[in-house]
Amino acid sequence: MANNNYVISTLGSHSALQILKGARDEGFKNLVICKRGASQPYRSFKVADKIIEVDNYEEIHELEKQLIKDNVILIPHGSFVNALSFDGLNELRIKYFGNKAVLPWEENRTKQREWLSKAGLVVPKLYQDPSDIDGPTIIKFFGARGGKGFFLARNEQEFRKKIAPHKDKKYVIQEYIIGAPLYIHYFYSPLNQELEVMSMDRRYETNVDSIGRIAAKDQIDLNIESSYNIMGNQPLVVRESLLPEIFRMGEQVVKQSKKLIPGGLFGPFCLETVVTPDLDVYVFEISARIVAGTNPYINGSPYTDLRYDGPMSTGRRVAREINDAIKSNRLEKVLHSDKAS
Ligand code: AMP
């Protein structure tokens, strides 16, 4: 079953390995666009049919004509906006899996909050004024990647001291939820309008996830500040009784997206949550595309094992959706359409 007419392509980082392998497993040719010097993993793991090396990702605009001619379908991942910029991504006329109209909603923390709240999910409290801080808070910068630079503050005084070096940055002050982080990976099919739970992960963040390796006394003596810079992901499953709520949350997010965003959300997405000791699930962020937390599951997850006969990564699920769309003459249903935005 070779889908020789289309080439599935992505940028060489984030979750490209599983996207490329998933494309192949579904019978597509693939292509990866890499920064010069960063192509070794794609060669060594033998997942790429073709590798194009560029000095700068923006060179994709020069390649655009050829990529369109070659029937390339781009699969966006978490490095796309950073690599190509919003406007750059919007300008691209290459076929694109997903809905670009979702991007501004994902990028803006205020809009995200509106979306999640309107979907009826529990979100952490936001503090409008530092003088209102009356408990643990986390200060997040707009556009910060992987939690880099976030800090904690318990009161206004601590906040003022820690914000001082970040004068011109936009930020939000969010209630810090004490609980266990849980990242839920979903896939919503625009073809059969069904929501799937693909997998889950917990992030491995430096240094918060390793501070416990030294004694509390040393933590204080060394004056360590928590940081949340992500360096990897660990697999996870939840207690089964949480699953009905997890499905409900995903379904509500999709339903609400159809009301707020022309064309709505489809394809892979992730709800980033903290689960409290009362098992309340607080959602603090949404990623509206494949997340790197799916990378431990190139061979499928315990959840995809239940539903599919063979290994099903999220990358492969994307290719499967494109495959199904082609077979049923509905390719436009899974690609960005300028008419929707
Ligand atoms: P983010 O960049 O929003 O994914 O946040 C980075 C990390 O900060 C997360 O992985 C969590 O460990 C932590 N975090 C973010 N928001 C909260 C919150 N409201 N309560 C507790 N932990 C949080």
Image: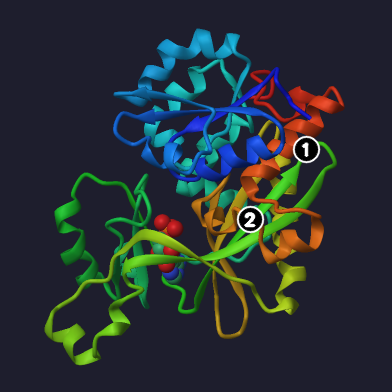
> Which comes sooner in the sequence, label 2 or label 1?
1
Residue 111 shows up from this direction:
yes
Residue shown at 71% from the left, 58% from the top? 197
- Mark 1 belongs to which amino acid? Pro
Q: Secondary structure at mark 2?
A: loop
The picture places residue 281, in percent across and down from the top left corner, at 61, 71
Of 300 and 284, nearer the camera is 300
Residue 96 to residue 318: above or below = above
Q: Residue at x 50, y 39 (%)?
A: 46
**Distance of mark 2 from mark 1, alpha carbons?**
24 Å
Position above or below: 166 against 95: below
User: Residue 215 at what x, y percent from top left?
Assistant: 24, 90
Residue situated in front as seen by the camera: 118 or 78: 78
Mark 2 residue type: Asn
Is residue 85 at all visible to an observer of this figure? no
Q: Tell me the quarter of the image containing the N terminus.
A: top right
Report the disc number at residue 106: none
Residue that label 2 marks: 299
Left or right relative to 89: residue 329: right
Query: Is disc 1 placed on a helix, strand or loop?
Result: loop
Residue 120 falls left or right of residue 309: left
Crowdedness near tag 2: few (<14), some (14–19) or many (≥20) residues, C-alpha within 10 Å: some
x and y percentages locating residue 17 in the rendered image: 51, 43
Q: Which mark is residue 190?
A: 1
Q: Quadrant of residue 154?
A: bottom left
Q: Residue at image x 73%, y 24%?
A: 3
Ligand 1 placement by image quarter: bottom left
Residue shown at 12%/85% (left/top)? 221
Image check: 308 left or right of 95? right
